[in-house]
Image: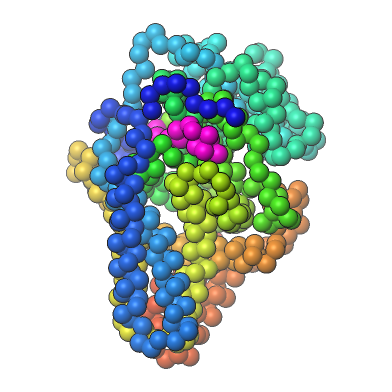
Amino acid sequence: MAGPKEGPPCIMSLAEIALRPVRAHPARPARGGGRWLGAFLALTALLAGALIAAMALAIKEWTVLSALALALAGLSALWISGGAATALVGLAQPVLARENVPDGWRPAGRTAILVLLCNEPPAALARYLSDLRRGLDTLGLGTEAEIFVLSDTSSREGIAAEDAALAPLAAAGEITLRRRAKNTGRKPGNIADWLDTHGAAFEHMAVLDADSRMSAWRLRDLIHRIDTRPRTGLLQAGMTLLPGRSRVGRHQRTSSRLLSPNFGRGMAAWAGECGNYWGHNAIMRVAAFRCAATLPRLSGPPPFGGPPLSHDFVEAAWIRRAGWAVELDPDPSGSAEDGPQTLAAFHRRDRRWCQGNLQHLRLLAAPGLDPVSRLHLASGVLSYLAAPIWLGLVALVASGAVTVSGALPLALAAGILLLPKLCAMAGWLARARTALRRRVILRAAAGELWRSTLIAPLVMVRQAGSVVSVLTGHDCGWTPGAAARRIPPPRGLPEAAVGLALVALAALSGSGTAALWVLPVALPLVAAPIIERRLDAGA
């Protein structure tokens, strides 16, 4: 097994201008978590403990169901407190300046830019790759960086479209187009095949998806950073979203631009050299990735068996286990991906992510993993279990099965949920140089909060359904045509049904406290058919 080498450890709107990244201090390598990991754990424990104590004090009568409700509240408290603690740590970090690449610098080895493509529209990708090739040449990386398009497209129509869009670039020497005859192992298998055939000729590999983008200068920065840090095996770049084409798409982009930089700085600080990998917009050392090229196949049938669907978290954990540093550069400049433009598309992707993250339950005890890698895996699991946990807790209170006095736990939970947004807004306002910029930031933050409040219960219900689906043995996987054959329910109807059920439970219980718990969740659910139509407008 390979180990680390020797060495030391367009036209912009006002909102776009206001949310441009600002960096002030030179970037520096990750330091391995250290005191910031301790601060993160302490803050998580403090916030979660406060919420659990508030819930315990609010329970009027102790029964088996009351104890269950407290246990559910504790798990939910851990999840939301971890997010709040990450944001608080992020607020304490300086906004880093990009490292200057010295004039005349040349990397010690060659870099392959791998673009993974599978039955996706290729026209926009072809235009981007042509621009990227010119940008790399302009920056002096003409011979040091080579672009590979690794296609797993299988349909006749898709192959014809790819040939029409990408073959001219290949003929001109701008890219190397490679299409597999047999799509074994999906994306990880495609990269593993490339490693076997081409990996020996390259020192580094940058991974992009067909719908992700990185500028030539950002790629050069990443190449320089990993080239000058022999311990670093993987460097994940922060990301924002490409401009949205619907209300929900624009909301996701605003939310990403507001929240991700501060949250990313916090995660980079406490994770240190044990960061995570998000599957694309990252660069890694070829020698390091060989440690993760063959992932474990989980025993038994899907949904819990088979190859890991969310393989990126596992790859990061395996690379770290082999002794390499896995770092996060939270700066989103020059790095973006496309997001789903309808809630239905969001839910389809999220269902697959749910199954992939729940599979990580079987990897938490894998031997030799760094404790922080286990924390990343556990966090992914809890991010999906949180939805049925919170829904179950609200149902217990709404039905009167668990009687609570007052709404202190609910108010405290809302405050913890707001902390990441407040930290992000405080960071932006601290760097705003004009009153106009501050007004734009406040307006964007208020709009993001309002839309998130409406969308969160809808996502909660769908994620709860996804968890139940996985736990009852239903595989979503990547089965060809499965999504097309599945008849979706009318838009917003399942959410509205759950909302009405919660309202009925609260009404039957006759408790005013139950109503306080239920209404913030139930009202958006009841209005889900209207909300979804408005959010999907323009898609």
Residue at the location (65% across, 26% down)? Answer: 195
Q: Residue 497: image x %, image y %?
A: 57, 75
Q: Nearer the viewer, residue 486 or 307?
A: 307
Residue 180 horizontal side relative to residue 200, left or right? right
Q: Residue 168: image x %, image y %?
A: 68, 18
- The colour scheme of the drawn protein is rainbow
Residue 136 horizontal side relative to residue 438, left or right? right
Residue lying farthest front?
Answer: 367
Q: Nearer the viewer, residue 264 or 47?
A: 47
Count of numbered marks: 0
Residue at the location (68% across, 57% down)? Answer: 303
Is 36 in the magenta? no
| Quarter residue 293 falls in | top right
Q: Residue 337: image x %, image y %?
A: 51, 39
Q: Nearer the viewer, residue 127 or 236?
A: 236
Look at the image and tell me in which quarter the N terminus lies: top right
Residue at the location (28% across, 27% down)? Answer: 26
| Quarter residue 103 falls in | top left
Residue at the location (47% across, 78% down)? Answer: 68
Q: Nearer the viewer, residue 536 or 237?
A: 237
Residue 23 horizontal side relative to residue 535, left or right? left
Q: Is residue 400 visible?
A: yes
- Depicted 474 relative to depicted 178: above or below: below
Residue lying farthest top?
Answer: 104
Q: Is residue 90 visible?
A: no
User: Where are the magenta residues, as a range?
Assistant: 318-333
Is 331 in the magenta? yes
Q: Residue 186: image x %, image y %?
A: 70, 39
